[in-house]
C-alpha cells in the first residue's frame, strides 16, 4: 500500500467567542495557511454558524478537521504541524486510529472505517505491532467484530493470510480470530490450514472460527 493517500491538506476550523483555547489554535492554522501548507482553509464562528455544529457533530471548541481526521480541544503547534504533514499518510492514519481507540472512541473509528474502507487494512497494523497499546488492540477487536460479515471486512484478508504464517503464535491466533469474522469463502481454507498449527491457542481459535461460521459463503 502506498504511503501517501492524498497530498492535499484541507482544514476546517470551528471556534467560538470566550473560548480560551480558540485564539491559540486559530493563530497556528493562520500561520500554516500563510506559509502555504494548507491547500484549503475554512474557519467558522459557531456563534454565527450554529447550524454547522449539528452537521459536523461538534460538541466543544476549538474543533478542527484536517483532511479526514477530526480533533477538538487545545493542541500545540508541533502537534498540529504533525497532523498537517501526516494526515494523508498511512503512518498518520494508523497513529490517529491507535490514539482514538486507546481513548475509547470505538464508534468514531468504526464510522470512519465505513466511510473510508481503505483505513481498514491500515488499522490492521495494530495487530502486527505487538507493542500497540492494549486498549487499542481491544478497541480494534471490538471494531472488527462490529463489522463481522460485512463485505468491507474482506479487504483485510491478504494481511490475515500473511499473519497466519507469522513466527509469533500471538499473531497467528489474532489472524484466526479475525478470519472467523470474514464473509469471504477463502477464510474456510485458511482457517482449516491452521488446525495443524503447532500452538494450541492457534488451533483452538481456528476451530472456533470454523465452528462459528454463520456468514453466507
Image (cartoon, rainbow, N blue to C red):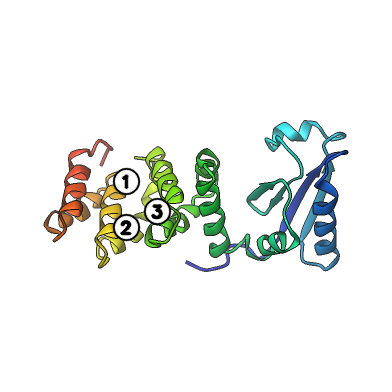
Rendering quarter of residue 105: top right
Q: Residue 39 vs residue 210: left or right?
A: right
Instruction: For the C terminus, give its image quadrant.
Output: top left
Rendering quarter of residue 59: top right
The x and y percentages for residue 171 are 30, 59
Q: Which residue is mark 2?
A: 160
The x and y percentages for residue 10 are 72, 56
Element type at mark 2: helix
Element type at mark 1: loop
Q: Residue 44 vs residue 2: left or right?
A: right
Q: Which residue is mark 1?
A: 182
Mark 3 surroundings within 10 Å by alpha-carbon count, few (fewer than 14), some (14 through 19), many (20 or more)? some
Location of residue 211 with respect to 70 vertically, above or below: above
The x and y percentages for residue 203 are 16, 52
- Label 2 with label 1: CB-CB less than 8 Å: yes
Q: Earlier in the sequence, mark 2 or mark 1?
A: 2
Location of residue 67 with respect to 36 vertically, above or below: above
- Separation of disc 1 and disc 3 at Cα? 9 Å
Mark 2 surroundings within 10 Å by alpha-carbon count, few (fewer than 14), some (14 through 19), many (20 or more)? many
Residue displayed at 74% across by 49% down: 74
Q: Residue 210 vs residue 182: left or right?
A: left
Q: Earlier in the sequence, mark 2 or mark 3?
A: 3
Q: Which residue is mark 3?
A: 155
- Label 2 with label 3: CB-CB less than 8 Å: no
Amino acid at each position: 500500500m502506498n504511503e501517501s493517500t492524498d497530498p492535499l491538506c484541507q482544514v476546517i476550523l470551528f471556534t467560538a467567542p470566550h473560548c480560551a483555547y480558540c485564539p491559540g489554535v486559530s493563530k497556528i492554522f493562520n500561520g500554516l495557511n500563510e506559509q502555504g501548507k494548507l491547500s484549503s482553509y475554512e474557519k467558522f464562528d459557531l456563534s454565527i454558524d450554529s447550524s454547522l455544529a449539528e452537521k459536523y457533530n461538534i460538541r466543544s471548541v476549538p474543533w478542527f478537521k484536517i483532511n479526514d481526521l477530526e480533533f477538538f480541544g487545545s493542541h500545540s503547534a508541533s502537534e498540529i504541524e504533525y497532523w498537517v504533514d501526516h494526515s494523508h499518510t498511512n503512518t498518520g492514519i494508523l497513529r490517529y486510529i491507535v490514539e482514538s481507540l486507546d481513548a475509547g472512541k470505538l464508534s468514531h473509528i468504526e464510522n470512519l472505517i465505513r466511510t473510508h474502507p481503505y483505513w481498514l487494512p491500515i488499522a490492521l497494523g495494530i495487530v502486527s505491532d505487538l507493542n500497540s497499546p492494549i486498549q487499542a488492540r481491544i478497541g480494534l477487536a471490538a471494531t472488527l467484530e462490529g463489522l463481522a460479515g460485512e463485505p468491507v471486512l474482506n479487504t483485510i484478508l491478504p494481511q490475515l493470510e500473511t499473519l497466519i504464517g507469522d513466527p509469533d503464535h500471538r499473531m497467528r491466533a489474532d489472524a484466526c480470530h479475525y478470519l472467523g469474522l470474514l464473509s469471504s469463502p477463502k477464510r474456510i481454507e485458511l482457517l482449516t490450514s491452521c488446525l495443524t498449527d503447532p500452538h494450541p491457542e492457534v488451533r483452538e481459535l481456528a476451530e472456533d472460527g470454523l465452528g462459528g461460521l454463520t456468514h453466507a459463503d
